[in-house]
Amino acid sequence: MPVGIKTKYKETLMDALESKIRQLDMSRMPRHVAIIMDGNGRWALQRGKERSLGHVEGVPSVRNVTELSSDLGIKYLTLYTFSTENWNRPAEEVEALMYLIGTSIERETPDLVRNNVHLNLIGDIESLPADALARLRACADATAHCDGLVLTLALSYSGRSELTRAARLLARQVADGILSPGDITDASVAGMLYTAGMPDPDLLIRTGGECRVSNYLLWQTAYSELYFTPTLWPDFDKNALADALLDYQGRERRFGLTGAQVKGDIFSQDDPLAR
């Protein structure tokens, strides 16, 4: 694309983004946004490239959603970076992805500190290669003092494994006499999850056209608003995130109540027209 056309294209995107941001109600922003970053491999294959190139091209999208989330005052952003099932992919792809995750986070650390973003890690992170884990932990340590956006990377993560781990931890407390079975509550389970202390996601975004949660934050997303987009992750930019946020703000979150109750109307709960 010629330089002049490329510049004009960027200006158009910026104008569109500014328009969308003006439409957002800052008092109704989600506290916690979770994203399944899907479509890197397909993005590369569609262009006749190796799948690993798609992961490289997906890094700017991580930067874009982090920047906009921080700018909009979103407190928590949790990214499904690598699932336990992803270990079954070709060894070369896994190796390249692990290297990319470690080096990208190391490179982004100064900007994260500058923007007051705290890096958090969840999942079976001890299973990661030593070099990648060391780089990730170095970034987490360097940003530990930051009190702005909490950027959480779910690495070697499985929602079912997380729940199994929580059950084992609670069972151990029961066996040790610290807790009785009757004392176990939703809050007890939540306190044993990797995300303990974090609010549940208000909005779960999945890119790439698939309409499933793929073993991601199974407990935490019980009442999350789900947003599926065909956009492949490397093409998911700030405009795309703004679209998702606008869609979210157009929904009515009822949590089992009727629409009338949520609105504070006086209709009877038994009135079908109030639902």
Image (cartoon, helix red, strand yellow):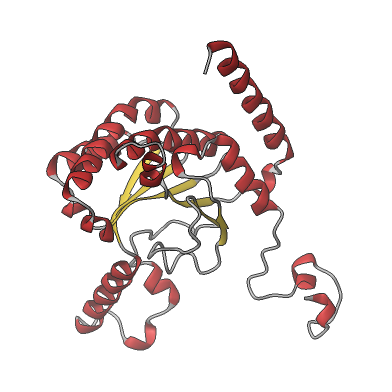
Q: Quadrant of residue 214?
A: bottom left
Nearest to the observer: residue 10 or residue 202: 10
Q: Is residue 108 left or right of residue 16?
A: left
In the rendered image, residue 48, in percent from the top left (x then y), is placed at 35, 37
In the rendered image, residue 6, in percent from the top left (x then y), is placed at 56, 18
In the rendered image, residue 69, in percent from the top left (x then y), is placed at 53, 39
Nearest to the observer: residue 260 or residue 59: 59
Question: In the orientation shown, which residue stands out farthest toward the front?
Answer: 48
Q: Residue at x 55, y 62 (%)?
A: 224
Q: Is residue 193 left or right of residue 223?
A: left
Kindly tell me whether residue 141 is visible in this rendering.
no
Q: Residue at x 51, y 69 (%)?
A: 222
Q: Is residue 86 left or right of residue 76?
A: left
In the picture, the quarter occupied by the C terminus is bottom right
Kindly tell me whether residue 255 is visible in this rendering.
yes
Q: Residue at x 21, y 37 (%)?
A: 99
In the rendered image, residue 72, in percent from the top left (x then y), is placed at 59, 37
Q: Is residue 92 left or right of residue 218?
A: left
Question: In the orientation shown, which residue stands out farthest toward the left?
Answer: 130
- Up-down relation of residue 63 to residue 262 (above or below): above
- Up-down relation of residue 97 to residue 272 (above or below): above
Q: Residue at x 78, y 82 (%)?
A: 269
